[in-house]
Image (cartoon, coloured by chain):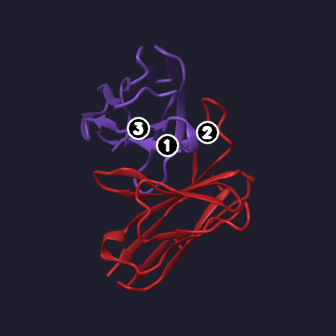
Amino acid sequence: GQQVMQIPQYQHVQEGEDFTTYCNSSTTLSNIQWYKQRPGGHPVFLIQLVKSGEVKKQKRLTFQFGEAKKNSSLHITATQTTDVGTYFCAGPKAGGTSYGKLTFGQGTILTVHP
Amino acid sequence: DAGITQSPRYKITETGRQVTLMCHQTWSHSYMFWYRQDLGHGLRLIYYSAAADITDKGEVPDGYVVSRSKTENFPLTLESATRSQTSVYFCASSEPPRPNGGRLFFGSGTQLSVL
């Protein structure tokens, strides 16, 4: 079945350093979504990428969708303590009755040391 | 997001007992989902529903039952709880996904411990 792999599983950075998490799917995705979960909280939608090679920015966050639509990345520039949390990528299962269901990566847990 | 609420927030039960986790949304979203979250596994889909009276299995449905008699409610029942079902359970909802859509809105979660 479809697998979505995310690396690294953990990342510890000093405040001000950059951070990147990578997401790879075993199948081509129609779109990819990113979510952030603060410690003790619930996942919150960040963004959706749809087009091959798409790049979107949200302040210090840059999201990319690969040309083959099988991989994606999230890059945070100059991390802050407010960036702490788990970042998930998620892709929809292909077609048919699977329409609307998302397969999530395992997530990358980011800790930021002040 | 206050539009989707889960109860209880925390639950402790014993093996073999039946447990029901509640989920209620006020947006009239047609799609609803149950995920469980375990360290190292991310979020795994248990069941989902495309509309009232329409439900289907996800990745890990064994030991769980769902129903959806009304659009706004999507309860999850553990028929006979086992220790392996100790987890954090998230309910989510979404609008009918457009060809490239379907962002999820999550509830605050239920932390379930089975002793």
Disc 2 target residue: B102
Instruction: Tell me the tag on residue A102.
Output: 1
Distance from disc 1 to disc 3, alpha carbons, whole Å, reads 24 Å
Rendered location of residue A59, percent (x, y): 51, 23
Name the kind of residue labelled 1 in the image: Leu
Image check: A40 left or right of B105?
Answer: left
Quarter residue B88 falls in: bottom left
Query: With respect to residue A107, does B21 lie above or below?
Result: below
- Is residue A16 something that shows in the picture? no
Distance from disc 1 to disc 2, alpha carbons, whole Å, reads 9 Å
Residue contact at pointers 1 and 2, CB within 8 angstroms: yes
Q: Residue at x 62, y 68 (%)?
A: B67
Distance from disc 2 to disc 3, alpha carbons, whole Å, reads 25 Å
Query: With respect to residue B10, does A11 lie above or below?
Result: above
Secondary structure, mark 3, is helix
- Of B81 and A110, nearer the camera is B81
Q: Colour of chain B?
A: red
Rendered location of residue A97, percent (x, y): 57, 45
Instruction: Tell me the tag on residue A83.
Output: 3
Q: Residue at x 66, y 65 (%)?
A: B68
Quarter residue B96 falls in: top right
Rendered location of residue A47, percent (x, y): 54, 31
Q: Tag 1, which chain?
A: A
Q: Are marks 1 and 3 on the same chain?
A: yes
Q: Tag 2, which chain?
A: B
| Chain the render paints purple | A
